[in-house]
Amino acid sequence: MTRNLREHILQTASGLFYSQGIKATGIDTIVKASGVAKMSLYKYFPSKDDLVVAHLQRSKEVMLSFINCGIAGEDKTAEQKLLAVFDVFAEILANPEFRGCPFINASAEFADAPAPVRQAVANFSEALHKLLADLALQAGIADAQQLARQLSMLITGAVVSKQIEKQPDTMRTAYIAAKILIEQGAKTRI
Amino acid sequence: MTRNLREHILQTASGLFYSQGIKATGIDTIVKASGVAKMSLYKYFPSKDDLVVAHLQRSKEVMLSFINCGIAGEDKTAEQKLLAVFDVFAEILANPEFRGCPFINASAEFADAPAPVRQAVANFSEALHKLLADLALQAGIADAQQLARQLSMLITGAVVSKQIEKQPDTMRTAYIAAKILIEQGAKTRI
DNA sequence: AAAAAGACAGACAGACCTGTCTATTTACAT
DNA sequence: ATGTAAATAGACAGGTCTGTCTGTCTTTTT
């Protein structure tokens, strides 16, 4: 039961943090929503910051496994997988519960963030970059790092744009741009 | 004196909101930093939300005039002006006091934002898009709207990436990608 | 110079938030 | 069955925040 309880608290908190914002979600709200005693929460997460870090860690894992799942397939070329990443994000953005990127939001909420929070935020960014860079490398693109940075900027920009405006085809625009950048990069193969 | 006082309060608040975050900046902090009486602040800005909206409005004007200033020049072609926008942002990102985009940050801080705040955030985004779309149109690019959306995503992505990671040449990467997208767009002239 | 308006200084109410503490109940293991 | 560990319920302290209120001082106007 102990593992379940921790997981249950984290799951509840994660949902609230994402949908309402971290600072806007009080401990009491999490306690009430999860139907757990406050002391239990503080047993597994000694402070709210610990809970926030765990939430970001969890979000990172969820996101990465979601992406990896979406680009899987032996029949896909590396270039197709790069584009498939954009399809995954298109799906995420289409979800009516989409409320922006949890990492970007956290980064903005914690201007003078405690180090662990900032670190957790940077982690996902790096992981996504590495994933893209590996694919670009597999595609034989000469400056794989550069292309990966460009694509990750496009994704970031699309996610934020979608959050601010309401435009429905945001990710489609990013997809088209990505295709152009990938093709251009592919001209300078190793 | 009355206009000056209002302006002085707004200027102080704007600086604090940007550097420390909006929710993290209390009214008392603004009062102390501006050396003004609390009652004076509440006279000109009946609530903190009013002050936040004024701050975003002000930031929008500052940013737009900064951009317009950076791309001015009779000798520049429309395409050069598009790229000059990226140079302006490179300058902004190079500033050691850079702390992300005030609008994106506000959007993330106010998950369930009051309508006026969300509106003020969307305003800048639209203004930037319009500026880019007009330049793309002047450059004779067929799908000017599409290119403008792509470029504004790149800018947004670069700004956020810079905020999260510490990479020094973020805007350079965006610039190169922009060049490719503009050239590609220019192939399908009207 | 006197009167009126504007600005300052800071106390205060009411709400909310984090984190702690105690007392009670539930679940389990021996 | 009984003792131990875990979970619950909720009061509480200490702090912070917004927004209000009251007096005092300064400036301007007449």
Image: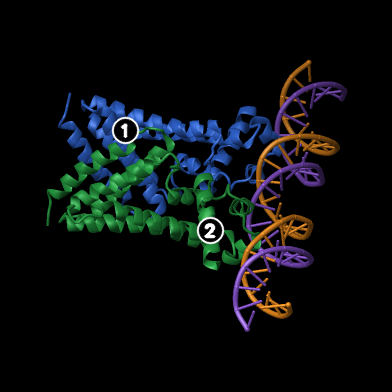
Chain colours: A green, B blue, C purple, D orange
Give the quarter of the image for residue B112.
Answer: top right
Look at label 1 and name its amino acid: Ile
Task: Report the side of A37 relative to A86 (left or right).
Answer: right
Name the residue carrying label 1: B71
Depth check, front residue: A128 or B127: A128
Residue under the point 38% across and 53% down: A63
Question: Relative to B46, is A92 above or below?
Answer: below
Counting from the top left corner in percent of width and height, residue A100 is at 43, 44
Counting from the top left corner in percent of width and height, residue B69 is at 36, 32
Alpha carbon distance from label 2 to label 1: 53 Å
Residue under the point 33% across and 42% down: A90
Residue under the point 56% across and 34% down: B114
Question: Relative to A183, is A78 above or below?
Answer: below
Instruction: Tell me if residue A179 can be seen.
Output: yes
Name the residue carrying label 2: A8
Q: Specify few, some or many for label 2: CA neighbours under 10 Å numbering under 14, 14-19, or 20 or more.
A: some
Look at label 2 and name its amino acid: His
